[in-house]
Amino acid sequence: MKIIVGLGNPGLKYEATRHNAGFMVIDLLAKKLGIKVKKIKWKSLYEKVNLRGESIILLKPQTFMNNSGIAVKEIVDYFGVDIEDLIVIYDDIDIPFGTIRIKKSGSSGSHNGMKSIIYHLNDDSFPRIRLSIGKKPDYFDLADYVLSGFSKKEAEVFDREVSAAASAVERILSEGLDAAMNEFNGMDYML
């Protein structure tokens, strides 16, 4: 079993914000699979699907970003999955806009949702996919920036990041993490 978690904030108010990058990828994956992520359990919206004989759960925590670890721990404990079978997708201000990064493990950086997950799991050795939301301008407060929307030009680039991240998840599931890292790390979606 694999658990694919997209981070974001619940509610229409946050739907198209930079901080909801993970939710956007989960929604695209669900669309590709012909399903909707709308069941409620583990303080999350989720859907379970079989893909090539393996159970996959798409998960959107509804605990708000800074408490994402509560929901993630509940589902990991419920199914007893290995930490390597958890993939977390989230926004990142520290990588160049127009790129995604796939890592096998690592720290939370400045991301509070990841801090919560690592704290509650007491482990940071799970794969993650980071989507760049652009560098915060000096005149913006960080919270205001991540909760802001994209300009039309930014949205075009970000849509390509979301599509690439969804394809990266599919590649991880079919060929493994290393194959996805080799294909998607270093790609520039600004073009």
Image (tube, rainbow, N blue to C red):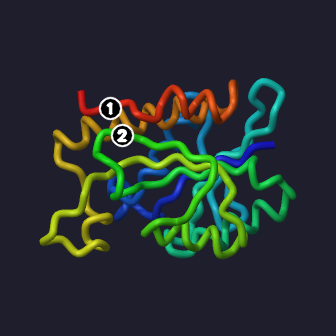
Q: Position of residue 177 (x, y in %)?
A: 65, 35
Nearer to the camera, 173 or 17: 173
Residue denoted by label 1:
188
Which residue appears at 49% of the width and 69% of the height?
65
Q: Which residue is mark 2?
A: 99
Of marks 2 and 1, which one's residue comes earlier in the chain?
2
Few, some or many C-alpha atoms within 10 Å of disc 1 (few <14, some 14-19, many ≥20)?
some
Residue at image coords 25%, 57%: 135
Question: In the figure, is residue 78 to the left or right of 71?
Answer: right
- Secondary element at image label 2: loop
Residue drawn at 74 percent across, 40 percent down: 56
CA gap, disc 2 to disc 1? 5 Å
Task: Answer above or below: position of 185 versus 67.
Answer: above
**Residue type highlighted by circle 2:** Thr
Mark 2 burial class by Cα count in 10 Å: few <14, some 14-19, many 20+: many
Q: Position of residue 79 (x, y in %)?
A: 85, 56
The answer to whether 138 is drawn above or below residue 23 in the figure is below
Query: What residue occupies the far right of the structure in this picture?
Result: 80
- Image coords of residue 184 (percent x, y): 47, 31
Image quadrant occupied by the N terminus: top right
The disc labelled 1 sits on which kind of residue? Asp
* Rendering coords of residue 127 (x, y %): 63, 49
